[in-house]
Image: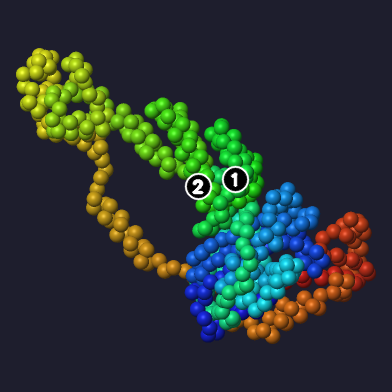
Amino acid sequence: MFVRGRLTRQPGVDPRALTFAVLDLETTGLYPNKGSRVCEVAVVRMRGDGVVLDEYSTLVNPGLRITNDDLHGITNADVAHAPTFQEIAGDVLVYLSDAIVVGHNLDFEEGFLTAEFGRLGIPLQSMPGLCTLVTARVQLDRWGYKLDNVANLISGEWPTALHSALGDARTLAATLAKLIADAPQPLAWAGPPPAPLPELPRSGRITPRAAGLRKGSEGWLATLTARLPLTPYSPPPRPEGLRDYRALLAHALADGRIVGDEAAQLATLAARAGLTQSTARQVHEEFLAEARARAEADGVVTSTELKELQRAAKELAASHLIGDLEEAAAANRARSNGPLRGWRIMPIGDGPAVTEVLDFAVEHGAKVAVNVTKTVRLLVSDGAAEHDPRIAKALVAGIDVVSPDQARKLLEGEVAKIHGRLFADASGEQLANRLAAEQAAATRPAGPEWHEFWRPRELTLAEYHAMFVERRDDWDEVRTIQITVPDTHHRQPAMPTAARKSGCLAVIAVGGVLVVSVAELVRQMVA
């Protein structure tokens, strides 16, 4: 199926401009020739410079009972509502077409794709392929080449949503992009160019799994949404699944927060509805917008309603939809606690100058008076109603009567007293900025730690075969190595039967001969 290419330090095509289709499968077993089937597939299409172009992910109904759910977390209930491979075959081909297909141990993916498409009578040939397991072994001199180990080595972080197809495909895509971008020596693509694949009818049906849920700093729903595929052109959600998802969402938010069990149930219904990142966000935003409309129906959003909306908005990652309500509430709080709190100002006249002063005063916490009372601290008149009896009453009461300009200066002075900074020092700020710039200039960026494991030269095909292929072919599960050790004259007590059977290294002392079974030990060291 695949024609293998490689990332090499030799001359070749710049991979940063090429399109890669990073593929991962979850399966019901290890051997497609013995009936194991695909139960989840994911593809991340990306350019070699790290730009993700599209994502595809769906559970697959394998048509048989899943017995290895402890490995990938996919249950028979999960795939009951998922499409079969025959239904998604056309979609998979579109995502693999015109790209270099990438897998970590590409032989595994090749075996299952060959079997699945073979059942449909569709032989696929001459697809360009890149195995990152081989790439890592050829370029890096460090044992432990499993995906999580390589990803941690190159990125410094452990993968999330491990053993889910989309989680592993994303991890591999990010690792590949970082390898290409940060390799100590430029890597080039040596292999066939991307080519179109045969076209089949597309169903557009997906059942994406949101795996590896955690609350995090942004809440359960934010993680759930992020675990769904990021697809520019999402298929419409299935109506019955969407109805159930919205109903459970309302139930979960009734107490203002979502807990882990509720998030897991929502993830199940999101899969059945066929939600992607974009459609999930749309559902969440519509849900919050409808709740806001209900709160505003009577013309007033009470403080209790605002708190409910704020809690829901945080859970739904849609706070921007109630930002104006929060700003209005914050402005009201700021006004009530502003620097002119306690001031009551009375206007005489309604000219623009008077209105402008009143707006400024109210914005900073003042209240507008209607009648002249002893609580009024200032009367503002533009002179248009100089004979207004309220002016005479204010003067008798000892209340200052001022023009709009005089009032503005007086009020600004009061505000400045409150907002004045005791320790403001422009020269100190400039000094701090200059020292920060000097420190940044003196600090030379160090290379990534994983460069320490970059081989002095990449392995040749013969070296790779001797180190990673022949060694595996020579393994013998029953052979032992005899190591003679001196007799210390101190016979150890017999090992219990259970202890002799446990562990990956069995050691049996017979006289002065130590018999060690090392097959499994060597297997773990090489893997």
**396, above or below 269, in the image:** above
Left or right: where does residue 495 sit relative to residue 48? right
Instruction: Return the x and y of residue 332 as percentages of the image width and height.
Output: 33, 31
Residue drawn at point x = 65 percent, y = 79 percent: 126
Residue in the image at 75% along x and 62% along y: 37
Which comes before the other along the chain, label 2 or label 1? 1
**Nearer to me, 273 or 21:** 273
Front-lying residue, 167 or 350: 350
Nearest to viewer (mark 2 / mark 1): 1
- The x, y position of residue 103, in whole percent, is 64, 69
Q: Is residue 278 above or below residue 253?
A: below
User: Dot 1 corresponds to which residue?
Assistant: 239
Image location (x, y in percent) of residue 64: 79, 56
| Quarter assignment of residue 432 | bottom left
* Residue where numbered disc 2 is placed: 282
Assign the N terminus to one quadrant of the image: bottom right
Asked if residue 226 shows in the view, the reply is no
